[in-house]
Image (cartoon, grey):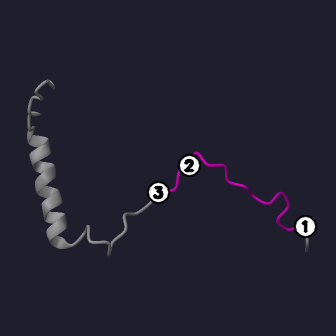
Amino acid sequence: MAAKRKKKKVTPAQIEREAKRAAQVAAGALDGRFREKVVKSGKSYKRKPKHPDADV
């Protein structure tokens, strides 16, 4: 027989998060019309041209 699992305790932070998400859903934020802003990672290597004015 499988062991019984205990219910997880609900913290006040979780309750606040649930309320915020419910408000966002009511406002339509999660229905696919909006996209979150993506911050580009600074870890990727940025290639720059070696001599930008060489063809002039």
Count of marks, rendered view? 3
Crowding at dot 3, Cα within 10 Å, few <14 / some 14-19 / many 20+, comes out as: few
| Mark 3 secondary-structure assignment | loop
Q: What amino acid is at disc 2?
A: Gly
- Residue 23 occupies which quadrant of the picture? bottom left
Expressed as whole percent of the image width and height from the top left, the position of residue 39 reads 46, 57
Say whether residue 41 is left or right of residue 35: right
**Which residue, given by chain and number where applicable, does mark 2 sit on?**
42
* 7 drawn magenta: no
| Mark 2 secondary-structure assignment | loop
Mark number for residue 39?
A: 3
Q: What amino acid is at disc 3?
A: Val
Expressed as whole percent of the image width and height from the top left, the position of residue 27 reads 17, 72
Question: Are circles 2 and 3 on residues that touch, CB within 8 Å?
Answer: no
Q: Nearer the viewer, residue 32 or 40?
A: 32
Q: Nearer the viewer, residue 55 or 21?
A: 21
Residue drawn at x 16%, y 26% is: 2
